[in-house]
């Protein structure tokens, strides 16, 4: 390819979003001090390991504040409703294998299977669907911490997430796909937002309000 044609072709590819994915490195070589959430154990970071950053899937775009929907789907169960006062997130109904993307850029702090058989406390596992009565936990899931110490959580993925602890992810980057692992009655994304770096119930806020305030309302592209 001649030197004069190549820059033009690259410019066209950029406009079409067809450029090749980039390789990025962990910027901080120190391991993350993170013990995970739910029933899983701690996850480690491999300092300086090259991280593959896949291209973002097609969607309606990012808000001016740098946030986007984790997927385009209706909210079918809200935050701490009368029927579910302990529901610390919202459920977005979507077909199995629908891509789930990062709502904002940040660092992955949790990525593992959280699925326990409530009858005896043994591992239920995430290589089969969970049961709403017999299984506890988030199933295959990802937690991301963002620049303002907010944490977003993505639960019930169909298979092992595409990202690992320590990975830096960009807004709109695919994290995994919708499934029904853990405490789940059918395919959906359970999505949570936590503030002040608190991954527990005390830090949970209403994701619908949070996302709407950041120009990326759940349930439909703006």
Image (cartoon, rainbow, N blue to C red):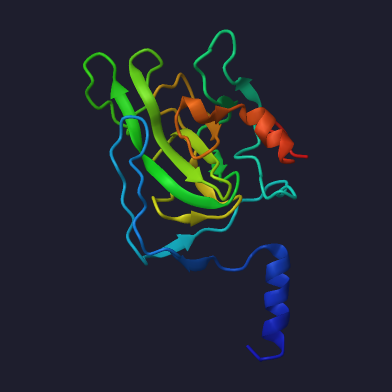
Q: Position of residue 64 (x, y in %)?
A: 75, 50
- Residue 158 lies in what quarter of the image? top left
Q: Residue at x 55, y 41 (%)?
A: 150
Q: Residue at x 56, y 52 (%)?
A: 173
* Up/down of 165 relative to 129, above or below: below
Taking depth in this image into account, of 138 and 146 the one nearest to the observer is 146
* Up/down of 121 relative to 159, above or below: above
Q: How many marks?
A: 0
Q: Is residue 128 left or right of residue 104?
A: left
Q: Residue furthest right?
A: 222
Q: Does residue 79 appear in this view?
A: yes
Q: Position of residue 37 (x, y in %)?
A: 37, 34
Q: Is residue 218 left or right of residue 83?
A: right
Q: Position of residue 66 (x, y in %)?
A: 68, 50
Taking depth in this image into account, of 141 and 165 the one nearest to the observer is 165
Q: Residue at x 50, y 60 (%)?
A: 53
Which corner quadrant holds the N terminus? bottom right
Q: Does residue 97 appear in this view?
A: no
Q: Residue furthest top?
A: 83
Taking depth in this image into account, of 27 and 92 the one nearest to the observer is 27
- Residue 92 lies in what quarter of the image? top right
Q: Is residue 114 left or right of residue 85?
A: left
């Amino acid at each position: 390819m001649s030197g004069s044609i190549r820059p033009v072709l690259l410019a066209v590819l950029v406009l079409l979003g067809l450029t090749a994915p980039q390789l990025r490195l962990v910027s901080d070589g120190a391991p993350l001090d993170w013990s995970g959430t739910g029933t899983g154990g701690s996850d480690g970071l491999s300092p300086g390991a090259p991280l593959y950053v896949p291209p973002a899937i097609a969607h309606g775009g990012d808000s001016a504040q740098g946030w986007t929907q984790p997927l385009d789907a209706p909210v079918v169960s809200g935050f701490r409703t009368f029927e579910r006062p302990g529901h610390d997130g919202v459920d977005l109904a979507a077909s199995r294998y629908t891509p789930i993307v990062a709502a904002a850029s940040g660092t992955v702090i949790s990525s593992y299977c959280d699925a326990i058989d409530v009858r005896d406390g043994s591992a239920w596992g995430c290589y089969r669907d969970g049961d709403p009565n017999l299984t506890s936990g988030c199933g295959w899931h990802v937690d991301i911490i963002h620049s303002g110490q907010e944490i977003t959580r993505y639960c019930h993925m169909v298979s092992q997430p595409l990202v690992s602890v320590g990975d830096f992810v960009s807004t709109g980057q695919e994290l995994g796909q919708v499934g029904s692992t853990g405490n789940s009655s059918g395919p959906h994304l359970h999505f949570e937002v936590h503030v002040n770096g608190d991954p527990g119930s005390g830090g949970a806020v209403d994701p619908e309000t949070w996302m709407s305030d950041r120009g990326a309302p759940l349930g439909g592209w703006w």
